[in-house]
């Protein structure tokens, strides 16, 4: 196999690996779960019943918890967008002792 074909294959595999790592970043999973559960719980809090409000001393706990979960999930997604993963290509280190 020629060297050019090997380097192209390696570059393609590195790209695919970086894409998979970004897809399964823990911030994506946690933020997505908080957003989904926040929508479900907040949606339940939009239509409270009297028995549920009586149990929580008049506080619509589902609505407030859902909103808090939406905020936390949004912060995780914002963190992911502002500080994305950087794929280390294994190239030369910058600022080594050999370079003056």
Image (cartoon, rainbow, N blue to C red):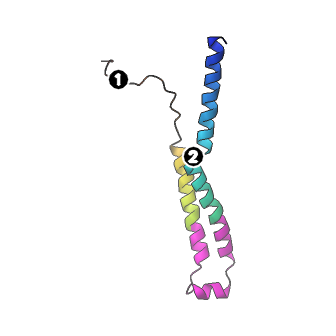
Q: To which residue does mark 2 refer?
A: 25
Q: Marks 1 and 2, how far apart in space? A: 30 Å
Point out residue 39 in the picture as x, y percentages from the top left corner.
Answer: 66, 65
Confirm or deny contact between disc 1 and disc 2 (CB under 8 A).
no
Residue ID at (64%, 84%): 52
Question: For the view shown, which residue lies furthest in the front direction?
Answer: 1
Using the rendered view, name the quadrant where residue 31 is placed. Answer: bottom right
33 in magenta: no
Question: For the view shown, which residue lies furthest in the top direction?
Answer: 2
Residues rendered magenta in the picture: 39-67
Q: Nearer the viewer, residue 40 or 24?
A: 24
Q: To which residue does mark 1 refer?
A: 96
Q: Nearer the viewer, residue 33 or 2?
A: 2
Dominant SS type (magenta)? helix
Point out residue 84 in the picture as x, y percentages from the top left corner.
Answer: 53, 41
- Dot 2, crowdedness within 10 Å: few (<14), some or many (≥20)? some
């Amino acid at each position: 196999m020629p060297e050019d074909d090997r380097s192209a294959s390696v570059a393609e595999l590195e790209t695919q690996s970086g894409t998979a790592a970004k897809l399964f970043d823990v911030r994506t999973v946690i933020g997505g779960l908080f957003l989904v559960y926040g929508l479900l719980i907040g949606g339940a809090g939009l239509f409270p019943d009297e028995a549920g409000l009586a149990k929580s001393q008049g506080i619509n706990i589902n609505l407030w918890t859902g909103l808090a979960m939406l905020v936390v999930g949004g912060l995780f997604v914002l963190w992911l967008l502002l500080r994305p993963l950087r794929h280390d290509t294994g190239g030369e280190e910058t600022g080594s002792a050999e370079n003056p």
